[in-house]
Amino acid sequence: MQVKINILFIINPISGGRAKLRIPALIDRYLNKEKFNANFFLTEYPGHASEIVEEAIAKDFEVFVAAGGDGTINEVASKVLEHGKTLGILPLGSGNGLARFLNIPQNLKAAILLLNQFKKDRIDSAYFNNKYFFNLAGMGFDAHLSSAFSKDKRRGLAGYIKLSLKEVFSYKEEIYEINIDGVNYKRKAFAVTIANSSQYGNNVYISPDASVKDGLLDVCIIKPFSILKLPLLSYVLLKGTAEASDMIEIIKGKDIRISRPKDGPVHVDGEPLKMGKEIQITVNPLSLEVIVP
């Protein structure tokens, strides 16, 4: 007789602005019950997903499925990695950057059916000071926007675009001193993004050639630009041509140190945080086991 795998679904009820109450019913309908024993938890506050995983580890759960956006995935994956368990993803966020990179279906039924195949692979993770990240982390305009977006009542892509257009006109670039594998760079930048995968989400590509399996991170520096060039930058990100653009510089590396003039906002997988002037970033090759197509 086949021993069933204990699988826990951790559902963020507000990610992406979509109601999530029908999700347990869909999982019950499409998940292979001969293979899995399924349980569900809805998160109630930031950080709750991490607590749920920590408590469930003692109860013999092997697979933890993050049902939410990149922030929910970050919380679940960080604990899954620490305890050597397996991550599943149901992409329910505004952008779903990591899920898109891993070719996990955006359709919920298809994503549940993918879990049934139980095909696993290992991907890189990274440290941003003392925080894990799996997709992107960074500072500059992205981080400023993440901080502003977290306080905004409107969720979803439309609200994000509206806020971006409002904030971009008043944002001031900063000087960054960046050390990548022992080589020093000094750059004035609109934003500095550290990419493990290729995109922010919604197929907006900051580093089209990035890979979660190469043991490297891509330091993506968006150079200062005239506001008249904002449509061009948007076009570059949507077309996935950042490598060829003179608006963006991309340098690959493993050990990265960034110094900036003052403490301020950062984002780690889209979640806004505040950190000091010094940021230390390292890659952890093939450290996370995840269910993929």
Image: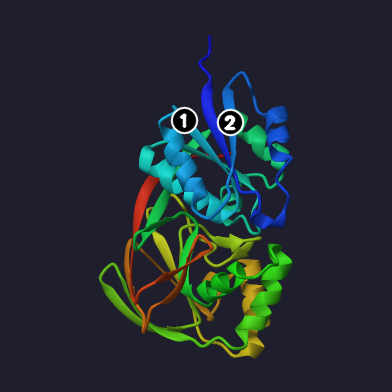
Give coordinates of residue 135: x percent, y percent: 50, 57
Q: Which residue lies furthest to the left in this view?
A: 182
Q: Which mark is residue 39?
A: 2
Name the kind of residue labelled 1 in the image: Glu
Give coordinates of residue 122: x percent, y percent: 44, 41
Q: Residue 62 carries which label?
A: 1
Q: In which quarter of the image is residue 283?
A: bottom left
Position of residue 193 relative to residue 223, above or below, is above
Question: Which residue is more in the foreground, 260 or 22?
Answer: 22
Can residue 288 be seen?
no
Query: Going 66% across and 58% down the picture, which residue do you hit?
Result: 94
Give coordinates of residue 234: x percent, y percent: 65, 75
Q: In this view, does 79 lie to the left or right of 166?
A: left
Query: Going 55% across and 77% down the picture, which residue do you hit?
Result: 245
Q: Quadrant of residue 166?
A: bottom right
Query: Going 59% across and 28% down the picture, which residue do you hit?
Result: 38
Distance of mark 1 from mark 2, alpha carbons?
12 Å
Q: Which of marks 1 and 2 is in front?
A: 2
Position of residue 50 relative to residue 278, above or below, is above
Question: Which residue is more in the foreground, 199 or 236?
Answer: 199
Name the kind of residue labelled 2 in the image: Asn
